[in-house]
Amino acid sequence: MSLRTQTGGAADRRDVVAPRAVDELAGSDRGSGPRRRSKVTGASPLMYVALTFVVLLSAAPLYFMLVMASRANSDILGIPPPLLPGDQLASNIDRVFANADVQFGRALLNSLLVAGTATVAVVVSSALAGFAFAKLKFRGSNVLLIVVVATMMVPVQLGLIPLYMLMTKIGLAGGLASVTLPFLVSGFGVFFMRQYALQAIPDELIEAARVDGASTLRIFWSIVFPALRPAAAVLGLLTFMERWNDFLWPYIALDFNHPTVQVALSRLSGGYYTDQALVMAGTLMGTLPLVVVFILFGRQIVGGIMEGGLKS
Amino acid sequence: MARTRLARQQGAGLAFVSPYFLVFAVFGLFPLVYTAWVSMHEWTLLAGKVEFIGLENYRELMVDSAFWRAMVNTFGIFVLATVPQLVVATVLAQMLNTRLRSRTFWRMGVLLPNVASVAAVGIIFGMIFARDYGIANWLLGQIGLDAIDWRAHRWSSWLAIATMVDWRWTGYNALILLAALQSVPKELYEAAKIDGASAWRQFWSITVPMLRPTLIFVTIVATIGGIQLFTEPLLFNPGANAISGGNRGQFQTVAMYLVQEAFTGQRFGYASTIAWVLFLVIALVAAINLLLLRRIRSAD
């Protein structure tokens, strides 16, 4: 979806910024120096108050989820609603895992498997293609790159029905493969890696390896891939979160015995009874892994989004 | 020597990009094209292909009141969600672009909602907007207003769903706009300051024009997402008939109608028609966006 690149011009300037910014977000601080020194308006105390309000608003629904997940149902259905966490969290979580209709434990494992596989595949396939587009000379590369950018516009959901028919035909409907296979590659990923590879890998390095007789594949594994590691980490994080949170296609494609977490959640909340504490405990369990990832790698994730937005 | 090396690069280049193109062709491009083919048939889940009927499904769709209702709902929710979202995101980006202590914390703070899955968001806000014991109604009560049966009316259900979308995406968009803001030359602001321009004037005369391409980009991404809106309205009203979007379809989106026709109504052909029309709408929006972008660039 890189409109900038399609229209040319600005793309070149962005290329120069790319690796530094990703590096910065992948942990090293060397990129942040110049920015911090640059003249930006200083923040007034009022700004901090306003931002605090925004962050509280961001966190409030998640806090509300925690409150409800830690209460008995009789507490929840009251006016005023409870505003502080209670002591029922453990028992509510137990009930989530004990619910045979939902198979929550299995759903967690399934999500881990599906999202993990997609992450590894997207990172490797994007690194391969990104490297080729950035550094190898081959006929048709310009046209193919435009095709990649164009495919970023096509959401998989629009092919929902044929995809379902295809999966049925090849005997994969209902199982985890049906929600994994379509997401082993990513147009965004290819483009993201290309932008990074353009700057992170000096041509001389590849040339030197060639003179030493290394094959292109060898060069990729021993030189290029290690150099792409910061971008790969960011892309991996973004991919994992996206796949973990995916709902529409898994909701349609998966059968009763193969839920992912999000599908399990919809089942949990779609029952005929309203056990809100149970539902919220499940939602909390489904969200917690990502919140942990976010707290650990928030800097990289923020950076990846800012990077991707510029580029895509 | 040079020739063989180039030949080797040709092969390696194509080999390295092939995993992407192979998987995309099978699971991305083929389904999309095949959707168009299926849409020209009477095609059911159980019986399979029955007959070729050309554009009959399209003709039927154009006079299908349920489809148009879903279309109106989709665009209504989209407008209700996108306009405030972009306004707030722009202001937020400007705020985040000041010299802040622990800037990573603030950036993560605004992004936090985006980490929650859309399913979780639908469920949580479904409870916040519950009729009897929901927090939203309790808050209304605190300021002396009557409780609202959020799911019962068109406008209130749209508002609740738009709130979910805004909550989840405003911070994300703010970060993208922030990235664009940081590439605005600082000298522009300094010059404006010397000329005595107020902060408000700087915002309108420098920030907004410089952000315009990114704003258009963010708008189109929001549009593509908005046109496909599915999970939030589905989980807003959990239960056996969730897919119908309320008792009178008051918040059923086009994507929900598509899934309902395909998997509840078992009409693959007709549902494919909906999918293809949806795709055309998205393509149209993308084309308009590109035209706008071109115009803006040439005006510079």
Image: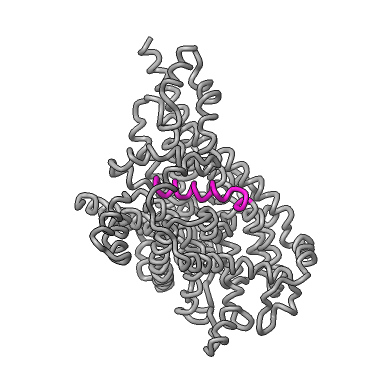
- Horizontal arrangement in the rendering, residue B204 relative to residue B52 (left or right): left
- Horizontal arrangement in the rendering, residue B164 relative to residue A116 (left or right): left
Q: Is residue B178 visible?
A: yes
| B102 in the magenta segment | no
In the rendered image, which quarter is residue A266 located in?
bottom right
Q: Position of residue B88 (x, y in %)?
A: 42, 66
Q: Position of residue B261 (x, y in %)?
A: 50, 64
Labels in figure, total: 0
> Extreme left residue here?
B299
Q: Position of residue B262 (x, y in %)?
A: 51, 61
Q: Is residue B24 visible?
A: no
At 46% from the left edge and 37% from the top edge, which residue is drawn? A193
In the rendered image, which quarter is residue B285 located in?
bottom left
- Horizontal arrangement in the rendering, residue A219 relative to residue A279 (left or right): left
* Span of residues in magenta: A293-312
At 45% from the left edge and 51% from the top edge, which residue is drawn? A155
Identify the main secondary structure in magenta: helix
Q: Is residue B214 above or below residue B21?
A: below
Give the colour scheme shown: one colour
Q: Position of residue A306 (x, y in %)?
A: 45, 49
> Extreme top residue here?
B1
| A305 in the magenta segment | yes
At 68% from the left edge and 65% from the top edge, which residue is drawn? A268
Q: Is residue B214 above or below residue B134?
A: above
At 26% from the left edge and 61% from the top edge, which residue is drawn? B205
Give the camera-side residue of A203 and B202: B202
